[in-house]
Every structure is written in C-alpha cells, then in structure tokens.
C-alpha cells in the first residue's frame, strides 16, 4: 500500500512539474506612465500652449533634473473623436511616491518656481476656464525579460 501511495504521489508531482525556464513570466514590471487627458475649449489652444511651453515645461524640466521623473511628453490627439481629449500629458517615472516624498517635492518645486501652493492652485483655476482635465491613468510598462 505504501509503495502505491508513493507512486501516486510521484505521478502527481510529475504532472505539476514545469521546466524552470517556463516558470518565469517573460515580462517584468518597468516604469510607470502617468497619462492625463486634457480638453481645450475652442479658441484657447494658443493660451494653453503658452502655459505648456512656459511654466509646465519649467516644472517638468526641474522634476527631471531632480530625478523625480525620467521623461515627459505632450501628445496631441490627431484623430480626435467626440468626447476624446485634445492632448495627453505623459510623465514617466520609476516608482510611486510616498506621502513624505510628495510634501518634500511640493516644497522644492514651489521654491524653484518662487510660488506658494495657493498661487499654483490659483493659476490652475484660471486655466480651468478653458482647459479641462479628463481622466488620469497610471500605467506600468511591461518589459521583456532578458
């Protein structure tokens, strides 16, 4: 009886055995991509483009110089359908921040831009008259395992 149980256990083990190479998933987690949807009212694209080329660029370049982000992009929705945004603002980074990192980064950014958080919010409020933030996605790259 004991030999029979050992044989059954051995057979069950072989059924579930998989070669070591096949056990590894061929994809691993990579960078995070934060994607923000932006819709701009007719007649205001130039005003928003000025903001993007000025303060937004300055802020993103500062974040990149600090290593907080790896890169950023502004993507236009060239074949926009009804209900879709005009632009996608993309930031690429390697980890999600902690609350303490958020506070430190906000303070450093405000010092760099010579503004307070309230002033930054007021500027965002002014842009909200013609710029509308839609959805925001946090995506994570899947990179092929070497």
Image (tube, grey):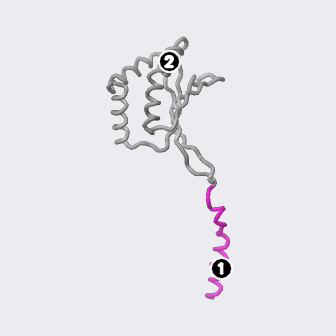
Residue 124 horizontal/vertical position (percent)? 41, 22
Query: Going from the N terminus, do you reach mark 2 or mark 1 first?
Result: 1
Circle 1: element type: helix
Residue 25 horizontal/vertical position (percent)? 62, 56
Main secondary structure found in the magenta portion: helix
Residue at x-position 55% and y-position 13%: 42
The reply to whether the C-beta atoms of the residues labelled 2 and 1 are less than 8 Å apart is no
Residue at x-position 66% and y-position 61%: 22
Residue where numbered disc 1 is placed: 8
Residue where numbered disc 2 is placed: 48
What is the magenta range? 1-25
Residue at x-position 58% and y-position 51%: 28
Residue at x-position 57% and y-position 22%: 86
As drawn, 50 above or below 12 = above
2 magenta-colored: yes
In terms of depth relative to the viewer, which is nearer, 14 or 58? Answer: 58
């Amino acid at each position: 009886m004991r030999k029979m149980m050992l044989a059954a256990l051995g057979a069950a083990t072989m059924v579930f055995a998989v070669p070591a190479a096949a056990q590894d998933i061929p994809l691993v987690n990579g960078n995070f991509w934060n994607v923000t949807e932006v819709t701009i009212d007719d007649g205001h694209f130039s005003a928003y483009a000025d903001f993007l080329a000025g303060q937004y660029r300055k802020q993103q370049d500062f974040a990149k110089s600090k290593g907080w982000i790896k890169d950023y992009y502004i993507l236009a929705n060239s074949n926009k359908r009804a209900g879709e945004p005009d632009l996608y603002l993309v930031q690429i980074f390697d980890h999600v921040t902690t609350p303490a990192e958020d506070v430190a980064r906000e303070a450093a950014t405000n010092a760099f831009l010579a503004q307070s958080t309230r002033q930054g919010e007021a500027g965002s409020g002014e842009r909200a008259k013609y710029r509308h933030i839609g959805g925001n996605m946090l995506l994570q790259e899947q990179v092929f395992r070497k």
